[in-house]
Image (cartoon, rainbow, N blue to C red):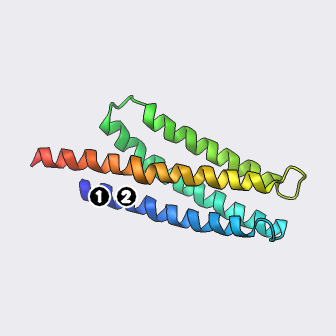
Amino acid sequence: MEHNIKDRLSLLVQQHKELRAISKKIDNTKETASPIKIRELLFTLLNLAKDHMKQEEEILVPLLEGMYHPNEQEIAGFILKEHQQLQSELASLLASVQTPEWDNDTVESLISHQLEHMFKEEYFLFPLIQHFYSGLRSKAQ
């Protein structure tokens, strides 16, 4: 089971790299690219993020419930809430391209929020999960 968990978490980390790359591209071009290009990049980011968040929820929520209690929604609920917030921010930003509400600071804020979320997962949540399940494997042997 531990190897399978490690592979699943590695998949999520690889997806984070893809999300970082598109976010960096948006950040680097937000002031010079046409609204059409920005919209295209944001749409790509939104779709990648939606797919990634769905996979995270399918992988992480059952693992977290297994670590704690099947009805425990505190940590899993936190992840779901952050995912909903990120998707909402992305959708709002996408809708605001080519409108007076468009603001480069909003792009920076979204990217910062997204990077912070991935950092927390990679450096706190994923190692916590891996440590917990490797401990179970050790106890079972």
137 and 123: which one is in front? 123
- Where residue 27 sits in the image (x, y, percent)? 69, 64
Q: What residue type is disc 2 on? A: Arg
Q: Is mark 2 on a helix, strand or loop?
A: helix
Residue 31 against residue 2 in the figure, above or below: below
> Residue at the spot x=62%, y=53% of the render?
112
Residue drawn at x 63%, y 59% is: 47
Is label 1 in a helix, a strand or a loop?
helix
The relative height of residue 12 versus residue 71 in the rendered view (above or below) is below
* Disc 1 residue type (three-letter): Asn
In the image, 132: left or right of 25?
left
Report if the CB atoms under discs 1 and 2 are less than 8 Å apart. Answer: yes
Residue 63 is left or right of residue 81, and the answer is left
| Residue 1, position as x, y percentages in the image | 24, 53
Q: Mark 2 points at which residue?
A: 8
User: Alpha-carbon neighbours of circle 2 within 10 Å: few (<14), some, or many (≥20)?
Assistant: some
Looking at the image, which residue is at 82% across and 52% down? 96
Give the residue pinned by disc 1. Answer: 4
Q: Give the residue furthest to the top.
A: 71
> What's the mark number on residue 139?
none
* Image position of 23 (left or right of 103): left
Instruction: Decide: few, some or many residues near mark 1? Use Cα within 10 Å; few <14, some 14-19, many ≥20.
Output: few
Camera-side residue: 73 or 104? 104
The percent position of residue 49, horizontal first and vertical second, equals 59, 56
Residue at the far left: name it. 141
Q: Distance between the residues labelled 1 and 2?
A: 6 Å
Q: Nearer the viewer, residue 18 or 105?
A: 105
Please give the name of the residue rendered at 35% of the width and 44% of the height, measured from the top-left corner: 63
Residue 66 placement (x, y as % from top left): 31, 38
